[in-house]
């Protein structure tokens, strides 16, 4: 198991031989990722790409809720639907935000600006660096 300090943000994914069920842990939360039946999985959880879309959708919704609460906006519910598609040279995300409430035009425009400031949106629209390390642990060797 990978350990982390309190400040470090970490998620751990573990897959065994059960195609393609993957157990994931972030803090004390456990979720399952899988592939659909037509891709050889058992569809016991969302696909990895679904989690990426859900991350953007949930971060946008939470950021908008925080802002609406802080400003006292009359917002009853926020729904964010995120789709993605391959485009030349990368991926495009389309975020459809529906706010149920009573907002003036200036408030609506501000909420649109705020939606683009959620941490996941910023991470996906700025340069990303991924450093990958690999270790092989031979479980069959005797100590």
Image: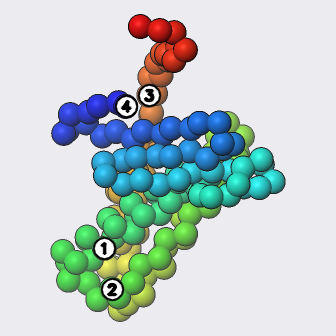
Looking at the image, which is closer to me, 85 or 1?
Answer: 1
Residue 57: which disc? none
- The residue sitting at 61% across, 47% down in the picture is 21
Q: Where in the figure is residue 139, as x and y percent of width and height?
A: 51, 18
| Other-residue count near label 1 (Cα within 10 Å), few / some / many at <14 / 14–19 / ≥20 | many
Disc 2 packing (10 Å; few <14; some 14–19; many ≥20): some
- Residue located beneath label 4 in the image: 1
**Residue that numbered label 3 is attached to:** 129
Q: Is mark 2 on a helix, strand or loop?
A: strand
Task: Identify the residue at image location x=18%, y=74%.
Answer: 70
Categorize mark 3 by other alpha carbons within 10 Å: few (<14), some (14-19), many (20+). Answer: few
Q: How far apart are marks 4 and 1 (CA)?
A: 35 Å
Q: Residue at 29% x, 31% y: name it.
A: 3
Check the image and name the residue furthest to the right: 38
Q: Name the residue under label 1.
A: 65
Residue 113 appearing in the image: no
Q: How many labels does the image show?
A: 4
Residue, disc 2: 75
Query: 4 left or right of 98?
Result: left
* Residue 84 sits in quarter: bottom right
Give the SS element for disc 4: loop
- CB atoms at circles 2 and 1 under 8 Å apart? yes
N-terminal of the pair, mark 3 or mark 4, is 4
């Amino acid at each position: 198991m990978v350990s982390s300090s309190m400040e470090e943000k970490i998620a751990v994914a573990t897959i065994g031989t059960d195609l393609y069920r993957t157990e994931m842990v972030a803090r004390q939360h456990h979720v399952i990722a899988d592939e659909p039946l037509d891709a050889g999985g058992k569809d016991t959880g969302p696909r990895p790409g679904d989690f990426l879309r859900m991350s953007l959708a949930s971060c946008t919704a939470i950021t908008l809720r925080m802002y609406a609460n802080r400003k006292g906006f009359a917002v009853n519910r926020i729904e964010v639907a995120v789709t993605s598609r391959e485009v030349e040279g990368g991926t495009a995300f389309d975020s459809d935000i529906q706010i149920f409430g009573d907002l003036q035009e200036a408030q609506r425009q501000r909420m649109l600006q705020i939606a683009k400031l959620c941490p996941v949106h910023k991470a996906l629209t700025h340069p990303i660096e991924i450093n990958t390390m690999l270790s092989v642990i031979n479980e069959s060797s005797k100590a």
